[in-house]
Amino acid sequence: MELISMFLWSSCLVLTVLLKTTIAAGSNVKYQTMKTCTLEGSSVSIVCSYSYPKGHKGTATHWFKAQSLDKVTHDIFQDHVMRDRVEYLGDGTQSCTVRINDLRLGDSGTYWFSFETDNSGKKLSSTSGFTLSVTDLVVEVRPEVTEGEEVDLYCGSCILSEAPTYVWMKDGHILASLERTNLLLIDPARMNDTGNYTCQVKGHEATPSHPVRLTVSCKQQVQVKLPPGQVKEGERLELTCDTTCPMISSLAFFEWSKDSRLLSDQNHRRQLVLDPVMAEDTGRYSCALAGQQELHSPAVEVLVQYSPKNTTAIMLGEPLGAASVTLTCSSDANPPVESYTWFKVNESTPVGSGQQYSITNIRSEDGGQYYCEAKNTVGSGRSPTLLVTLQGKADPPLPVVMVSVAAILVAFFVGIGVICGNKRRHRMLEDGTFDKAGDPGQSENTYSNMELKPTSSDYEDVTERGLNPTDSTYTALAFKSQSSEYETLEKARNTSNDYSNEPATGIYETLDDITKTG
């Protein structure tokens, strides 16, 4: 176990020494800068210095272009593309500077300097190479952006190392001059930012970039415009599909939608006309260019105001036999109903207000026809009449009333006639003018109404006692009076023989004979 540990420790120590030796060797090559960016067609000098390890003598120097030393293929001085454009400016002992003329875009890459000594037997170099970036003046930008977005325009692929001033132009006019940055930022982009952009570096005005077109499109190409003010039912309403992009032709066709449903009968019209506008036209409207419904405008809500409609009055509960009843009014309106008023047919003034109207302590006169009226700022609406019938408290039907009144009047006048007739006959009997009145028929009727049984023997007794049929005693007998005369007559009859079993017709026959002869 101890032997294994000692072996691992020795290995780590050897590896550490080797790494330090490599780094030390690599540190003999130094670059003034590690990277640079320059324009195509210009020249660049890669300033370099080196030193030999102690006890070594240089035998050869090399410049390579490669991503890494292990991928080196050939010296740039031997490359058929670069050999005529490169110059070695080193002195062979300490300086290793190289110059590249007439730079091309393909010259971009990583460059390495290495040397050989008489003792190393291999190429020595730095741990990292020099990075060269060659760029041309090309405006890099997204060709199309939407209004309101951020736009980045770059002049070239890198910032020039000589700290230049970038001059930006739009449509041939200077737009901005920016130092130490090749970025032109437009935030937010507007419609008037559309144009042709170029850039150039101050001091190299003869070689500007080629123009690049930037197009800023509308964020929303169309929008619905409403006339100002409130929209009331029955008026004329005109909606306009307005465009915010000036490049849209005035001859473009449009499509209209309501609540996300296409209005097929309103296609290809810039204006949507509703004349007259109705309550059912309330909804959310949008428009779009024909065939571009996916780019429709934001929806605009249309609220049509109308006076109360479908106004109804209902009765809550059963009023028959109840002590109170409540009537409720309902209506559809926009804006909502502001007031409710209750009326009773054939009455000139309102009987109540509010959505509910209660009738308490019901009386017969509370029965009848009621209706309500709903009002808002637009107008008013009236409900159909509602019949309120109160059982046991309502007035009787008219035919019954007429019959009852007629019966009362007939009874009244009959009673008056009977009273007057009785008084007249009574006066005639008292005056002794009953027979003189010349109304024998009246006497006969009177006798027949008496409906007395015939008692001829009794009448004879009356005659024998000297009673006069025309005096008050006779009158009392005819009207079944309870006067003293009648009582005397009864006493006279009762003192005679008992005639209760005999027929009573004889009395009237004898009485009639006496009357006629007298």
Image: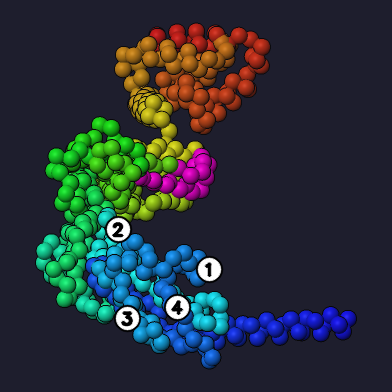
Whether residue 378 is visible, yes or no, is no
Relative to 499, is 174 above or below?
below
Q: Nearer the viewer, residue 440 or 513?
A: 440
Q: Which callout, 4 or 2, points to the residue nearer the camera? A: 4
Q: Nearer the viewer, residue 219 or 92?
A: 92
Alpha carbon distance from label 3 to label 2: 43 Å
Assess disc 4: are there few (<14), some (14-19) or many (≥20) residues with their C-alpha within 10 Å of its C-alpha. Answer: few
The amino acid type found where label 3 is placed reads Leu
Q: Nearer the viewer, residue 122 or 464?
A: 122
Q: Which callout, 1 or 2, points to the residue nearer the camera? A: 1
Residue with the most extreme bottom position:
54
**What percent of the width, then of the height, locates residue 328?**
42, 47
Please tell me whether mark 4 sits on a helix, a strand or a loop.
strand
Please state the extent of the stretch shown in magenta in the rendering.
315-332
Q: Which residue is mark 2?
A: 142
Q: Which residue is mark 1?
A: 70
Residue at screen point 14% across, 71% down: 205
Q: Which residue is mark 3?
A: 89
| Comes first in the chain, label 4 or label 2 | 4
**329 drawn magenta:** yes
**What percent of the width, then of the height, locates residue 435?**
35, 16
